[in-house]
Amino acid sequence: MTKRVESTSSSYQKPRQLGRALSETELKEVFELARRHKCVVSPRLLLRLSSVPLKDRWGLLQKAIQGHWTLRRVEAELSQRYGRKGRGKSPRIPQAPKELAYELLRSANWWLRFKEVETELPLPLPARNGVKDVWRAMQELKVRLEEILPPNPKGGEK
C-alpha cells in the first residue's frame, strides 16, 4: 500500500522563492564556493538570505559559507545588521512574581553556560571582560533565586 502525500501551496512556494532569489549561475557559484570550503548549504539558508538586500547578499553568503555558519548564526547576523523586522512577538514578561523568578533563573542559567567557553570567546578583551561581569552577576542572581524558590513543579532545573 502506498502512502498518499498531499502537496500544499507552501510546498511549491519555497522552491519558487529560491528560484527568484538566485539565478542558475549564482546558484552554481554558491555550490562551487560551498564545495571549496567543504560546507553544506541548506535551501533554508539560501531562502533566509534571499531577504537580504542584493548589495549585501553575496558578501554575506560568502561569509556564511566560509565560516560554516548555522542557520541560527545567520539569523543572529541578520538581526544585528537589520534588526528584528517583525520576526515574531517579543517574549511575554511574566506578571506573577513566582513565574518571573523562574524566568529570571532560566535566563541566568542560559548566561552561565558561557562560563565554560569564557577563555575561548572570539571577542576583544573589553567585551570578554563584560561577559565575565555578566556571568558573575548571573551567578549571584541564580544563588539568590535558588534560596527563595521551591523546587520547580515542572521538573528539570529550578
Image (cartoon, rainbow, N blue to C red):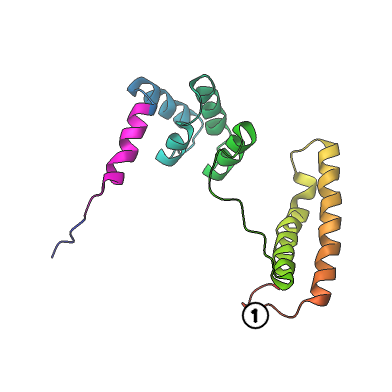
- Which residue shows up at 86% across the image and 38% down it? 126
Bounds of the magenta segment:
6-20
Quadrant (top left, top right, bottom left, bottom right) of the C terminus: bottom right
Q: Quadrant of residue 79?
A: top right
> How dense is the environment of label 1, judged by Cα within 10 Å: few (below 14), some, or many (20 and up)?
few
Q: Say what amino acid the circle numbered 1 marks.
A: Pro
Closer to the camera in the image, 31 or 82: 82
> Horizontal and vertical percent for residue 120?
76, 45
Q: Quadrant of residue 148?
A: bottom right
> Horizontal and vertical percent for residue 102?
71, 69
Q: Quadrant of residue 109?
A: bottom right
User: Is the stretch drawn in magenta largely helix, strand or loop?
Assistant: helix
Element type at mark 1: loop
Closer to the camera in the image, 37 or 7: 7
Residue 18 magenta? yes
Q: Which residue is mark 1?
A: 153
Whether 129 is drawn above or below 20: the answer is below
Side of 127 where 93 appears, left or right:
left
Whether 8 is drawn above or below 152: the answer is above
Residue 27 magenta? no
